[in-house]
């Protein structure tokens, strides 16, 4: 396939279709509803949401393709690459296309999951790929955590053996809540501004990027099937609400995707679809000693080797 923004966007729409079909089958009750929207400055998207399902209480699988004048934050210091911001006397035009997913399950033993795969280009020739998948279990089970990370490692190793350790570390650092001194979940992989290097051409990186997107549906449906029939208590639901509260804190305070959408005048309902239907906050909550909640709390830290 020729690398063009039109072909990439077409592939992303197909990815959205296939993921929604897989999730509807895994849920077995609800279907996605679609809303098409346009952005005054240029572009638009397809927002698809699912709610009140047998498995999925609330979730979204969104596609967007927006363009216009490059936003101001792209000209600031690049945090992870160490490179300086783009030096130019005028702002070039940009085009950004991607699929973004957040799913909040009903059963507290089924994890929250997030994925994003995105393509970005500017008319000055700059282009890059970004994305990743991360998991935020309400309860961390070692066998599920290892399955999740081993799957992502296999995807990385197929294309570039150095990617898993590099992008796993990036996810640990990115999906971190500094004011809580804890990770949002068990991480995964995260990458940004991936273009080309001496080791990897842009075409090879795009093949990797696509495989990350295609890995999502089988990975998450397996985790759903492992956990959706587990019985739970009101205490488990209470803990789920507290973990959702942490998720909301991260997305509203730190998440760059949320900030990008807001700073480019994106559609607010689509941007904030990542928030759960309900969440909770309790003053100075301390898990009961030797409980599943205490075990989970102890594992919300960087640097755990899951694969």
Image (spheres, rainbow, N blue to C red):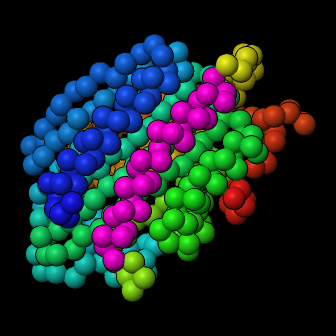
Quarter of the image with the C terminus in it = bottom right
Q: Position of residue 174 (x, y in %)?
A: 53, 60
The residue sitting at the right extreme is 290
The residue sitting at 55% across, 66% down in the picture is 157
Q: How many marks?
A: 0
Q: Position of residue 55 (x, y in %)?
A: 54, 21
Span of residues in magenta? 201-228
* Above/below status of 152 relative to 198: above
Q: Nearer the viewer, residue 46 or 215?
A: 215
- Is residue 52 in view from this perspective? no
Q: Nearer the viewer, residue 305 or 177?
A: 305
Quarter of the image with the N terminus in it = bottom left
* Above/below status of 105 relative to 30: below
Q: Nearer the viewer, residue 72 or 228?
A: 228
- Is residue 155 in view from this perspective? yes
Q: Position of residue 229 (x, y in %)?
A: 67, 19
The residue sitting at 31% across, 73% down in the picture is 202
The majority secondary structure of the magenta stretch comes to helix
The residue sitting at 18% across, 63% down in the picture is 2
* Above/below status of 28 relative to 143: above
Q: Position of residue 269 (x, y in %)?
A: 30, 32
């Amino acid at each position: 396939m020729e690398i063009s923004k039109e072909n990439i966007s077409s592939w992303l729409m197909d990815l959205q279709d296939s993921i929604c079909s897989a999730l509807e089958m895994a849920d077995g009750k609800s279907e996605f509803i679609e809303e098409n929207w346009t952005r005054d400055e240029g572009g638009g998207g397809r927002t698809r949401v699912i709610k009140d399902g047998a498995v999925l209480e609330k979730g979204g699988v969104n596609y967007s393709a927006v363009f216009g004048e490059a936003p101001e934050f792209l000209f600031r210091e690049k945090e992870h690459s160490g490179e300086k911001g783009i030096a130019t006397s005028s702002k070039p035009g940009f085009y950004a296309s991607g699929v973004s997913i957040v799913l909040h399950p009903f059963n507290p033993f089924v994890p929250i999951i997030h994925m994003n795969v995105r393509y970005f280009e500017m008319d000055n020739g700059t282009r890059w790929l970004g994305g990743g998948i991360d998991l935020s279990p309400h309860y961390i089970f070692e066998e599920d955590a290892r399955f999740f990370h081993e799957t992502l490692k296999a995807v990385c190793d197929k294309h570039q053996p150095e990617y898993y350790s590099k992008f796993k570390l990036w996810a640990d650092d990115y999906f971190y809540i500094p004011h809580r001194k804890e990770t949002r979940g068990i991480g995964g992989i995260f990458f940004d501004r991936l273009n080309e290097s001496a080791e990897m051409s842009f075409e090879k990186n795009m093949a990797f990027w696509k495989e990350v997107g295609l890995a999502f549906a089988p990975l998450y449906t397996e985790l759903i099937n492992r956990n959706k029939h587990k019985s739970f208590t009101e205490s488990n639901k209470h803990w789920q609400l507290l973990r959702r509260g942490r998720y909301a804190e991260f997305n509203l305070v730190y998440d760059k995707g949320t900030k990008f959408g807001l700073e480019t005048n994106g559609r607010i309902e689509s941007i904030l679809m990542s928030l759960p239907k309900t969440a909770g906050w309790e003053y100075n909550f301390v898990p009961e000693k030797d409980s599943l909640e205490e075990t989970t709390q102890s594992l919300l830290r960087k640097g755990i080797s899951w694969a």
